[in-house]
Image: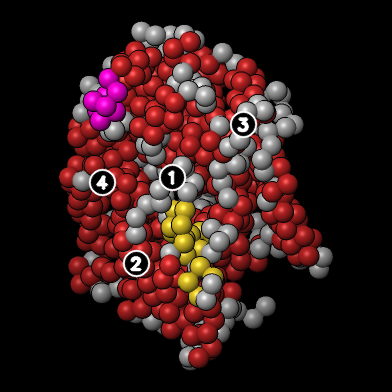
Amino acid sequence: MIAALVVFAYLAVVLYVGIFAFRSSTKSEDFFVANRSLGTAVFLLSLFGSNMTSFAILGSSGLAFRQGIGVYGLMASISGLVIPLSIFIIGTRIWAIGKKFGHMTQVQIFRDRWECGHIGTVIFALQALMLVPYIIIGVMGGGETLAGVSGGKVPYEIGGAVVALVVMSYVFFGGMRGTAFVNTLQTVMFLVFGTIAFVVIANGMGGFDKIVAELNATMTSSATTQPTTQPGAVLTRHRISEGYFFSYMFIPLSSIMFPHIAIFCLTAKRMASFRKTVIFYPLCIMAIWLPAVYLGAVSVSQPNVVAQMAVESADFKAFKEKSPAQAQLVEDVASGTIASDDPRAKALVDPNKPLRRQVLSVIGSNTDGVMLTLLSKFSPAFLAGLLGAAIMACVMASDSQILALSTMWSQDVFRFYEGDRRFGEKAQIWSARIFVVILSVIAYVIAIAVHQYASIFELAIQYAFSGFASMAPIMLACLFWKRSTKWGALAATLWVAACLVAAALIQANTPDPKGPPGSFYGLEWSKIGDYTLLYREAVRVSFTEYRFLLVFPMFVGSALCMIVFSLLTKPPSRATIERYFPAK
Amino acid sequence: MLTQEGPAEAPRLAVKPRKPWAVPVLVVAFLGVLVMRHDFWQWRTTEPLLLGFLPVGLWWQALVSLCASVFMWLCVTLAWPGHLEAEAIVAEKKRLEDKKD
């Protein structure tokens, strides 16, 4: 309970910081983009904080538990290259256009640049639909984290309500300024306590070199016939296909297309703020992802961690009914009744014992709790609370998304359809605040009602990344290609929307592959001659035998739509093009 | 103050012209980091370990992150789009004055 109290204290501080930033401004530019006045330090830390969702710590370590250290190269190192580069190339242009013309959202830029109205509304609708699952999953993550650090004493429903209320309050009062303050605090906390966690957990585990030597031994053993299934495979990239790894490089392009990141680019006072941001961004990613991925991967060697995750899994009850003696052993190891170095406990991580396979099967893909389990097993309660608060900081990254959606609502709908002219600028800000409340309440209700279907929202987010990344050609064409047109933008948007719907339908209507993790099969109907175009994997549909992510064909298709339909249609007026591309 | 810089009235607008070789150098550097990231040649091994506990697949990718940071420093140094800032600040001033009127 000490840990939960520390987290509650942290939430109180966050609330104070967010509301402290409140200014009774009636200017929409202040509420939505902090008067375009953020300094370098806050700009870097809060931009980074907005990009770090719960996935950065809970999801990455959970995925590393299943797939190994390759998760870092898959997601973090490429993000450290592509995200700052896209901020450098696109973000600086968005900032300059915002300053010049007063725009606050991407859709405002598109409407002005391509002289369109309702096409902008279509883009707004797709962006909003892709963003909503994040907000819901943020509330779910908050409820789960509070329940986790309190050992179940704070129920999920109460935890979710507390998080939703805290986020709603500081976004409501503080707007962009409050959100930026809070994100800065969260990022600093995360970096500091994340480092402490790494050291404490390393000590608790008894030193990493010993663990690595043991895991490595399972890979070099002469009896090893299937390296992918050995525990030591987590130290290699046996479980990640090269095609999947390659195609993942398109995903970080989604970052600059996320409305909350693009809007954030408008908050800097000077363009100089971007300099340090893009240089330090890869290092910040490394500081958070490297320990998270490493700890997630090596925790497969810890019997008490594996046992605890199995006990908390939804399938454990069925396992207990089927194999009561083995389930009792797992429970005893989880509770500490049987110590981790006991030979009976070692059976949970021994590749030659069937119990390991059974327990991993019980855990399945529910591995996001590995970091919280590590904290509860290897750190004192007070520190676990501080680290739980740091994890909570990441989970609460939904604040920027709520603010972005309310900004989009206010600018792209309320203002576009002349609400501000009829009711005034003050009403525009209040419409955004009311939108924040409604959105938070809806997110909470959905998060409570469909908690058991969290995987659906995770799936939606997975495809939303592909969706936003595939919309990058629209932004690139808007900023760099004079000949681009609104019809090209519409075609690309519809292509992305159609691909997302098709991918979801395919995934929903085809069975999961049977067999060990990493199994897949070709979809017969997608054959062209002898060549199979689409494959079904456990958590996704992939493209060609190389198992590329769908973002690869989606991105290429979106770029082609943009080019072909732009060339076939009339460009915007000369005056507009000259405003955006002034003669040097 | 940490969050807000001073008044914007005196921006440093001196714009350095970009060197003609800057873009080719940056493209080569970008491709270099991208190739480093796709280290398929050490896909299924843990060796050599760094500090006795970091497998090659992890420390190599951490090295990619460091190189990405150096690459971004090169971008900022060689191809900073300073002209955008100069234009934007002048235009913003005009926009805000028009709004007042």
Helix, strand or loop status at disc 1: loop
Tell me the chain of label 3.
Answer: A
User: Marks 4 and 3, Cα distance to the nearest angstrom?
Assistant: 38 Å
**Sequence-wise first label, 1 or 4:** 4
Residue that label 3 marks: A224
**Sequence-wise first label, 4 or 3:** 3
Residues marked 3 and 2, same chain: yes
Residue that label 1 marks: A515
**Sequence-wise first label, 1 or 3:** 3
Q: Is residue A40 visible?
A: no
**Sequence-wise first label, 3 or 2:** 3
Tell me the chain of label 2.
Answer: A
Helix, strand or loop status at disc 2: helix
Question: Is residue A186 positioned above or below B67 on the image?
Answer: above
- Seen at 58% across and 78% down, the residue is A481
The x, y position of residue A278, in whole percent, is 61, 50
- Seen at 26% across and 57% down, the residue is A432
Report the amino acid beneath label 1. Answer: Gly
Report the amino acid beneath label 3. Answer: Thr
Residue that label 4 marks: A453
User: Marks 1 and 3, Cα distance to the nearest angstrom?
Assistant: 19 Å
Q: Is residue A410 left or right of residue A204?
A: left
Quadrant location of residue A483?
bottom right
Image marks 2 and 1: residues in contact by CB distance under 8 Å: no
Q: Is residue A97 left or right of residue A108?
A: right
User: Marks 2 and 4, Cα distance to the nearest angstrom?
Assistant: 19 Å
Residue that label 2 marks: A501
